Amino acid sequence: MIWAVGVAPSPAGKWLKAATDRAGRVRVQQDLSVPGHPEIFVIGDTASLDQDGHPLPGVAQGAMQQGRYAGMLIHRRIVAKSAPPPLHYFDKGTMAVVGKGFAVLQSGRLRLSGFLAWLAWAAVHLDFLAQVASLDPFSRALVKNLRARALPSIEPMACIWLPLCSVENVRGKRGNRKTH
Ligand SMILES: Cc1cc2nc3c(=O)[nH]c(=O)nc-3n(C[C@H](O)[C@H](O)[C@H](O)COP(=O)(O)OP(=O)(O)OC[C@H]3O[C@@H](n4cnc5c(N)ncnc54)[C@H](O)[C@@H]3O)c2cc1C
């Protein structure tokens, strides 16, 4: 399998005049702040942070954990509480869809491939989308758009066990009537 993808680094390192790694990601401290700037946080794909001697991977779960951490840290500062301990990334595992109804999954010792792994992938992703959709009207609109564009193949099946979409929507799609 050949997978080629081009991802340009964020120019944030240049704006901030901060040290970057070879990929152009901003080197941050254990609390995700930029060295010398405790008021500036860089997270996700734009940040470069090592843990146990290895750089943290540029994946969604890393970005989400960093986002939660930075949010918590800022909140604690505002309410004048002590700083939390340094971020510790927890690797929940890896999933990838590699075909129609076929995925691979690795989490700790668990290794799965095939339809079962695909079901797990669909459940996890739709669960996160459902969480985002419950936040505010903008997020709901965003999720609707994503669902309409990216999930038509998995959504009808996901509706069997997730309260993400209504029965009317599924019927509407199958009957080629109004969708969202
Ligand atoms: C092809 C591909 C497949 C991937 N597959 C997986 C996968 O299967 N599993 C996984 O965990 N990860 C995967 N990743 C990695 C994952 O997408 C990223 O690690 C994750 O999205 C990082 O989140 P982020 O919030 O740091 O950045 P992003 O999700 O990229 O969000 C950054 C946002 O900032 C916006 N932005 C950029 N510049 C500006 C600006 N100047 N002003 C305002 N907004 C701006 C962008 O438009 C974007 O919406 C994949 C990445 C790619 C490219």
Image (cartoon, helix red, strand yellow):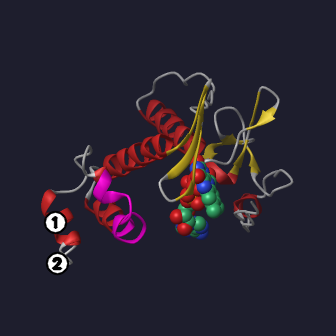
Occupied quadrant, residue 175:
bottom left
Sequence-wise first label, 1 or 2: 1
Magenta segment, prevailing SS (helix, strand or loop): helix
Question: Is residue 171 rendered magenta in the image?
Answer: no
Near-viewer residue (76 or 129): 129
Q: Residue furthest front?
A: 114
Does residue 56 sit above or below 83 in this rendering?
A: below
Task: Tell me the amino acid under the disc marked 1.
Answer: Arg
> Which residue does the numbered mark 2 point to in the structure image?
177
Residue 142 in picture, x, y percent from top left = 35, 65
Q: Residue furthest right?
A: 22
Q: Residue furthest bottom?
A: 177
Q: Residue at x 64, y 33 (%)?
A: 31
Does residue 21 sit above or below 91 in this rendering?
A: below
Task: Tell me the amino acid under the disc marked 2.
Answer: Arg
Near-viewer residue (22 or 97): 97
Question: Is residue 149 rendered magenta in the image?
Answer: yes
Dividing the image into 4 quarters, which one contains the N terminus? bottom right
Near-viewer residue (23 or 104): 104
Are dots 1 and 2 in contact, CB under 8 Å?
Answer: yes
Residue range (magenta): 145-157
How much space separates mark 1 and mark 2, taking CA atoms? 8 Å
Does residue 178 sit above or below 108 in this rendering?
A: below
Q: Residue at x 17, y 77 (%)?
A: 178
> Which residue does the numbered mark 1 point to in the structure image?
171
Visible residue check, residue 152: yes
Dividing the image into 4 quarters, which one contains the C terminus? bottom left
Q: Is residue 166 left or right of residue 95?
A: left
Label 1 crowd bin: few (<14), some (14–19), many (20+), radius 10 Å: some
Disc number for residue 21 = none
For mark 2, give the secondary structure: loop
Occupied quadrant, residue 50:
top right
